[in-house]
Image: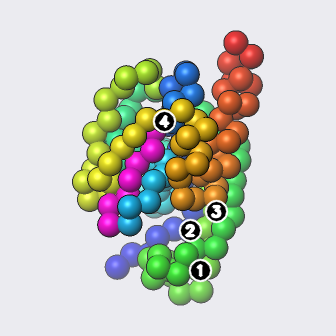
Amino acid sequence: MAFKIPESVLVVVHTPQLDVLLLERARQGLWQSVTGSREPGDLDLAATARRELWEETGLSAGTLTDWRLTNRYEIWAQWQSRYAPGVTHNVEHVYGFTVPDGVAVTLDPEEHTGQVWLPWQDAMEKTFSPTNRDAIWQLPRRVLRHTGGR
């Protein structure tokens, strides 16, 4: 078994109206944005983000924005065996992905069993991850900055 690289992406998928897509993790029942680890074949972190978007949602058309935000956190005990011995922390890179309202999402049932679009405030409350919650909290400010305040 190849160990996971302790570097990942968190992609907040949202509409221009700031509705956020959350996915329910299979077997855990936890809600989150698109996430995933970097793989050896990924050219860069944007490629990781696009690959994860496609694998988890079937989405490829949209605007990917690197928020230039990183989080370093301890890997939870239940996922520790996926990493090489001695690896205790992961570095997560945050992206936004803007899609039109009403876009269709196709889930990978091995990874996710549910999806929901929520206003950003509700999505922030529903996600289990503190870094995901913080990213969603930043969404309105990030979108205003990216669109020039429009």
Figure check: 65 above or below 147 = below
What amino acid does circle 1 point to? Val
Q: Which residues are magenta?
A: 21-27
Give me the residue at 29% from left, 45% from top. 107
Dot 1: element: loop
Mark 2 and mark 3 residues within 8 Å of each other at the beta carbon:
yes
**Residue assigned mark 2:** 6
Residue count near mark 3 (Cα–Cα under 10 Å), binned few <14, some 14–19, many ≥20? some
Mark before the other along the chain sequence, 1 or 4: 1
Residue 22 on the magenta span: yes
Residue 10 x/y as whole percent = 55, 50
Figure check: 86 above or below 60 = below
User: Would residue 68 appear left or right of 126 to someone viewing this image?
Assistant: right
Give me the residue at 70% from left, 12% from top. 150
Figure check: 96 above or below 4 = above
Q: Please say whether residue 97 is visible from this viewpoint.
A: no
Mark 1 and mark 2 residues within 8 Å of each other at the beta carbon:
yes
Dot 3: element: strand
What amino acid does circle 4 point to? Leu
Mark before the other along the chain sequence, 2 or 3: 2
Give me the residue at 62% from left, 42% from top. 136
**Residue assigned mark 4:** 118
What amino acid does circle 3 point to? Val
Cα separation between marks 4 and 3: 27 Å
Q: Nearer the viewer, residue 128 or 93?
A: 128
Residue 109 on the magenta span: no
What amino acid does circle 2 point to? Pro
Q: Please say whether residue 140 is visible from this viewpoint.
A: yes
Residue count near mark 2 (Cα–Cα under 10 Å), binned few <14, some 14–19, many ≥20? some
**Residue assigned mark 3:** 91
Mark 2, mark 4: which one is toward the viewer?
4
Quarter-wise, where is residue 58 in the image? Answer: top left
